Amino acid sequence: MSYILRKGEKKDAQAILDLIIELAVFEKLPNEVELTVDDIIHDGFSSNPKFKTFVAEESNGTIIGMALFYERYSTWKGKIIHLEDLMVTQSKRGIGAGKALYTSVLKHAYDTNCKRVAWDVLDWNKNAINFYESTGAKVLEDWRVVHMDEQNLKNFIEK
């Protein structure tokens, strides 16, 4: 293995942001990322972090992948985890880092007695869907993701 897995640290904030931006480009939404390095430091590495990360790091210190996740609460199940993003930089795909990061999140969920891990996948990302299904995950075809963006939230509240 040419990388190690570890918990993300404050010093990884720029690399995490770079991977988030690369993922946005891959998902054909390159202009959607509004976060800054300072946001990542504050939201992920303060005394009350809003998310956790695992990173895949090469021996030279380069971060080649990350998994970003946070706890949620299901009124049906209890404590669950939402896997927000799982990303390996394009030039390092196929070496097992993505599966290792995915496994780290699932093991963390198992070790902390979470009842479920949930995440979204784009319907055109057949490689990801096939991978997730091969691990026993179920892609729920009959549920729809609902978003209220910042502008529509403002419009609704200020009516």
Image: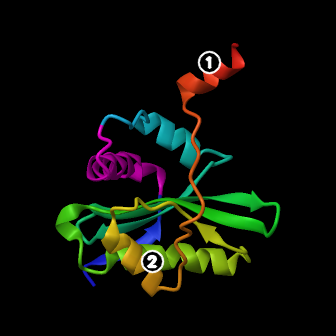
What residue sits right under mark 1 in the picture?
Answer: 155
Nearer to us: label 2 or label 1: 1
Badge 2 density bin: few <14, some 14–19, many ≥20, Cα 10 Å: some
What residue sits right under mark 2 in the picture?
Answer: 132
**Residue 132, horizontal then vertical, whole percent:** 45, 77
**Residue 156, horizontal then vertical, whole percent:** 67, 21
- Earlier-in-chain disc, 2 versus 1: 2
Magenta stretch in the rendered image: 9-30
Q: CA distance from mark 2 to mark 1?
A: 37 Å
* Amino acid found under the numbered disc labelled 1: Asn
Quadrant, the C terminus: top right
Q: Does any portion of residue 104 appear in the rendered image? A: yes
Identify the mark at residue 113; answer none if there is no mark. Answer: none
Q: Quadrant of residue 126?
A: bottom left
Quadrant, the N terminus: bottom left
Q: Quadrant of residue 114?
A: bottom right
Q: Does any portion of residue 100 appear in the rendered image? A: no
Judge whether residue 21 is colored magenta.
yes
Q: Quadrant of residue 70?
A: bottom right
Q: Give SS at disc 2.
A: helix
Q: What residue is at 52 percent from the left and 72 percent from the top? A: 139
**Residue 125, horizontal then vertical, whole percent:** 33, 65
**Residue 20, horizontal then vertical, whole percent:** 37, 49
Judge whether residue 7 is colored magenta.
no
Between 86 and 126, the one lying in front of the other is 126
- Is 27 on the left or on the right of 154, as rendered? left
Between 134 and 11, the one lying in front of the other is 134
- Is 2 on the left or on the right of 156, as rendered? left
Q: What residue is at 71 percent from the left and 75 percent from the top? A: 112
Q: What residue is at 32 percent from the left and 34 percent from the top? A: 31
**Above or below for 40 versus 118:** above
